[in-house]
Amino acid sequence: MIKSFGYAAPSATGALAPFAFERREPGPRDVQIEILYCGVCHSDLHTVRGEWPGTVWPAIPGHEILGRVTRVGNQVTKVKVGDTAAVGCMVDSCRSCSECADDLEQFCTSGAIFTYNSKDKHTGGITYGGYSNRIVVDEHFVLTVPKNLDPAGAAPLLCAGITTYSPLRHWEVQPGHRVGVVGLGGLGHMALKLARAMGAEVVLFTTSPGKAADAKRLGADDVIISKDAAEMQRHTGSFHLILDTVSVAHDLDAYTALLRRNGSLVLLGVPPTPHSGPSAFNLIFGRRRVSGSLIGGMRETQEMLDFCGAHGIVSDVEVIPIQSINDAYERMLRSDVKYRFVIDMASLAKDEPRG
Ligand code: NAP
Ligand code: ZN
Ligand code: ZN
């Protein structure tokens, strides 16, 4: 086993703090990565605070991982020592079910092994995420990062990027489509950039009037303050697709009403409590749909990274030392992040035990 080190939440209410643990030695198909940057996703917060069922503590979150390859097993072909490589939300799946065969490992019928808080078949414990100095992952779940992308800005592509790219692709967004994005946080700002790059007309719905200028810079053609009912009503029946990235429960009918015929409201945010709506009236008139989407498979994640490389797209990040993580969580809850915190993992050395 390899001595490793990171930051873990000790309980639902305890602050994240330094934590020593072990990673497995790389097997023939494994890649060992020294983590340089890890993005801070709202799912990390939901998990460590026990807002979703199933958290096992101590919990090391983090699934927007970018680093340098330091060891590879003798059967690894995808990367070599010294390469920049990335790991997203999954580290394993059965690789044989119909979902895995369709490159949709996130829907693996045996259950995808997520990067943190999943059962770890190698250690018998749970998986530990990227708020740590290194990770060991089967090469199938390792991504390569286009060289032109800033590494800190590229880290959030591994969750915020793929989670918004996948539904934009699935719903075949193209020029002439009107796409709404609800919430300007980590996911929301990537949705603006990606939908814009795909040629859509993009509209941001926000509760934060102060974000309007940024939203336009990030790719929004228009910004609507979602608390303004009259303004919302002006857009009734006009959207092909709306991506809802909000992390708290709200009324879905504020958005189903804005869809065109056959339009879809796609839920990406996973609030701990149920939304209200949708009303049957809003769905049957116009054959509108409410759907959901979960990250993306490995093939699509690589496609997204390559798309971002081709379009020069990275996340707008605020790089923080890991010692600021608890404060960063409080700021994320206040919607005070532009637009993704990314941990500079070199800062971990300060806390690391010597020897
Ligand atoms: P985030 O950076 O905190 O952004 C969430 C945004 O929601 C905020 O910036 C804010 O936007 C809006 N918001 C917050 N509180 C609100 C309130 N009370 N009413 C209305 N809007 C509010 O979070 P994130 O990292 O983008 O993640 C968003 C959600 O997606 C989380 O629930 C996360 O767990 C989930 N997620 C899902 C997947 C998936 O595969 N489906 C993947 C990753 C994350 P404004 O200030 O613009 O209103
Ligand atoms: Zn995430
Ligand atoms: Zn499977």
Image (cartoon, grey):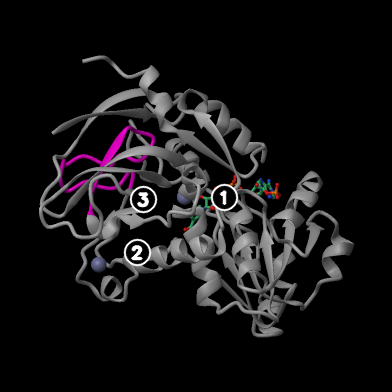
Residue 2: x and y in percent read: 17, 32
Q: CA distance from mark 2 to mark 3?
A: 11 Å
Quick check: 80 left or right of 252? left
User: How far apart, in angstroms, are the residues tagged by discs 1 and 2?
Assistant: 20 Å
Mark 3 nearby-residue class (10 Å; few <14, some 14–19, many ≥20): many
- Residue 182 picture location, percent across and down: 67, 59
Mark 3 belongs to which amino acid? Ala
Label 1 sits on a secondary structure element that is loop
Q: Position of residue 237 (x, y in %)?
A: 77, 78
How many numbered circles does the render carry?
A: 3
Find the distance from the CA under tag 1 to the CA under tag 3. 15 Å
- Mark 1 neighbour density, 10 Å: few (under 14) some (14–19) many (20 or more): many
Which numbered marker is on residue 86? Answer: 3
Residue toward you, 186 or 58: 186
The residue carrying mark 2 is 298
Write the start and end of the magenta stretch as one range. 115-138
In percent of the image, x 27 and y 70: which residue is there? 100
Q: Is residue 240 above or below residue 332?
A: below
- Residue marked by disc 1: 315
